[in-house]
Amino acid sequence: MKKWYAVIGDPISHSLSPLMHDTWFKENGIDATFIPIHVEPSNLKQAFESLQTLGVSGFNVTLPHKQAIIPLLDGVDDTASMMDAVNTVVRGGKLYKGSNTDGDGFVESLLTTESSPDSKVLLIGAGGAARGISFALKRRGFGDVTITNRTHRRAEELADESGSKSMVKAEAEKKLGDFDIIIQTTSVGLAENEALPISLQNIRAGTLAADIVYNPIKTPFLKVAEEKGCKTLNGVGMFVYQGAIAFEKWTGLKPDTDNMIQMITEKLG
Ligand code: ATR
């Protein structure tokens, strides 16, 4: 029987996950389909019960349900537990277990730039996305990670938990030239006229500037960094790798990420 997978979120119509996973199912000869489902927060429990009743084989969870789904599941793995957020649900028999592939997806994307774990990394932001990335960087051997955030207390807390350092924003702006990799994890700067979460005045040419946002492909943060002579990494790679890790959890197969990054870049570009 044809299997089916899904992504639930609110909003959901913009999601590129159906296109990505349907392409990978086809490429790998898997008889399955991937469906976007609009689920409002008040309907989450009912929606999950319906997914189970209808026999979903696995699904992605996106905003705003990444935390709210946790108590409904049969358990979560270490990564999801550490992040207190789930983006991937894997079915094993009758059990539905939560995982989180966002942080590892970012680091996989970062490693395509041949960045060394010896790099000095600055993480801008201390929300859910920064949390996943800070833990994943540590797991992958990046030993020198500093977190800065508008609300410094949150940076301190996340740094304590993830074994990183924290730095107040003004100091990070002054010392920006010390870092090899600067990762933008806030939702700020999506709009053209919005101020960047941090001034890039002192950024060093040759630094790698990475953004987790993939639409637009070139965020204002990346534009300014590029003007300053930085290398840039947009969020498409993170999106594709978080999906590839989920795909492997569901099917046991590693999908083609290079072609997918190219396809999505062309679609958004
Ligand atoms: P997410 O899960 O997407 O990371 P979040 O947990 O709400 O979302 O975190 C949003 C991040 O963006 C935080 O680091 C937030 O900073 P605060 O902790 O100070 O709120 C950051 N952020 C949001 N709006 C911002 C702004 N206008 N300027 C700077 N940082 C901002």
Image (spheres, rainbow, N blue to C red):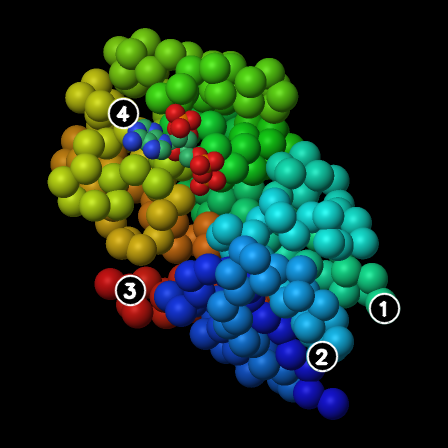
Residue 235 is left or right of residue 256, and the answer is: left
Spatial CA span between label 1 and label 2: 14 Å
Q: Amino acid at mark 4?
A: Ile
How far across and how far down the image is residue 158, in percent? 55, 22
Dots 3 and 4: beta carbons under 8 Å?
no
Residue 19 is left or right of residue 102, and the answer is: left
Secondary element at tag 2: loop
For residue 258, which quarter of the picture? bottom left
Q: Amino acid at mark 3?
A: Leu
Q: Residues within 10 Å of mark 2 (few under 14, many from 20)?
A: few
Spatial CA span between label 4 and label 2: 46 Å
List the residue tagged with mark 4.
198
Observer-side mark, 1 or 2, equals 2
Spatial CA span between label 4 and label 1: 47 Å
Of labels 3 and 1, earlier in sequence is: 1
Q: Which mark is residue 54?
A: 2
How far across and how far down the image is residue 173, in percent? 27, 16
For the C terminus, the image quarter is: bottom left
Secondary element at tag 1: loop
- Ligand 1 position by quadrant: top left
How far across and how far down the image is residue 86, in percent? 63, 49
Secondary element at tag 3: helix
Q: Which mark is residue 93?
A: 1
